[in-house]
């Protein structure tokens, strides 16, 4: 059985010396890139990964994690007490793929077939900010915007034309939105006023509302290809 599995996997390879071809050997399986995406902002537990990867089965997630670990892209680690749980995290080399995500995301956003109404994870919306940020529009802006999705806090900082996103406590943020990722996307990219969601109890905004209003202006979706 082990020999059959190895043969089956070998048959899926491109057998091409091109670096891009080998890259696809490593991450070309369905869900592999999205597993990597969800680890871009730090270690995650198996259950957290499955929750944010809509439609993936436990069996397929296990296979992708094992394959990426065997390739040296991620590793398993047990957190010390009192957590004492196993998490998955990218290796230093694994993190180096981040620019590929940004270029791919920006390119694919121009597709006429892109459907922005599909499910969106917390990491996805955070990474989209780095991809779509326009430093020319931000100018000399200096701000920190917090987002809380369930029990996950994130902070986006903008200063001197540079944007950073990370999992972090939102206590010191200028403004904090507590809601769900698709609603943040609607506000930032669809320019829907937060008040539209606050009225229905779907979003809570605390802090300096003017900061978020300015923040929204730094992001725009690109024109569709062929437009």
Image (cartoon, rainbow, N blue to C red):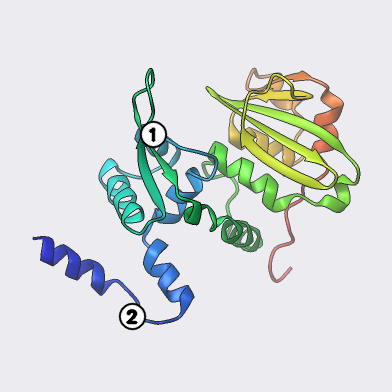
Q: Which residue is mark 1?
A: 45
Horizontal arrangement in the rendering, residue 146 relative to residue 96 (left or right): right
Q: Which mark is residue 23?
A: none
Horizontal arrangement in the rendering, residue 39 relative to residue 103 (left or right): left
Q: Which mark is residue 15?
A: 2
Report the front residue among 117 and 134: 134
Callout 1: 10 Å neighbours few (<14), some, many (20+)? some
Report the front residue among 210 and 101: 101
Residue 210 versus residue 7 in the image, above or below:
above
Label located before the other in sequence (1 or 2)? 2
Under circle 1, the secondary element is: loop
Report the front residue among 47 and 220: 47
Residue 213 versus residue 106 in the image, above or below:
above
> What is the quadrant of the N terminus in the image?
bottom left
Picture coordinates of residue 164, whole percent (x, y):
70, 42
Residue at x 66% of width, y 19% of height: 200
Horizontal arrangement in the rendering, residue 103 relative to residue 14 (left or right): right
Picture coordinates of residue 206, whole percent (x, y):
75, 18
Under circle 2, the secondary element is: loop
Q: Residue 82: which quarter of the image?
A: top left
> What is the quadrant of the C terminus in the image?
bottom right
Residue at x 28% of width, y 41% of height: 58
Picture coordinates of residue 18, whole percent (x, y):
45, 80
Seen as rendered, the residue at the extreme front is 80
Picture coordinates of residue 56, whole percent (x, y):
35, 45
Residue 205 versus residue 50 in the image, above or below:
above
Q: Are marks 1 and 2 in contact (CB under 8 Å)?
A: no
Count of numbered tags: 2
Residue at x 41% of width, y 38% of height: 49
């Amino acid at each position: 059985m082990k020999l059959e599995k190895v043969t089956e996997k070998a048959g899926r390879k491109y057998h091409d010396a091109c670096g891009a071809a080998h890259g696809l050997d490593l991450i070309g399986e369905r869900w592999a890139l999205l597993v990597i995406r969800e680890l871009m902002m730090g270690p995650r537990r198996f259950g957290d990964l499955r929750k944010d990867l809509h439609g993936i089965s436990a069996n397929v997630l296990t296979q992708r994690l094992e394959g990426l670990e065997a390739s040296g892209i991620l590793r398993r680690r047990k957190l010390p007490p009192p957590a004492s749980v196993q998490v998955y995290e990218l290796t230093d080399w694994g993190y180096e793929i981040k620019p590929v995500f940004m270029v791919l995301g920006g390119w694919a956003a121009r597709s006429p077939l892109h459907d922005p109404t599909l499910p969106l994870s917390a990491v996805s919306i955070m990474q989209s900010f780095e991809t779509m940020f326009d430093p020319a529009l931000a100018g000399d802006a200096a701000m920190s915007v917090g987002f809380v999705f369930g029990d996950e806090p994130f902070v986006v900082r903008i200063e001197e034309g540079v944007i950073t996103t990370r999992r972090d406590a939102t206590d010191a943020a200028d403004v904090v939105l507590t809601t769900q990722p698709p609603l943040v996307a609607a506000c930032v990219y669809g320019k829907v006023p937060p008040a539209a969601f606050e009225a229905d109890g779907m979003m809570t905004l605390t802090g300096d509302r003017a900061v978020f209003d300015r923040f929204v202006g730094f992001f725009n979706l690109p024109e569709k290809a062929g437009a």
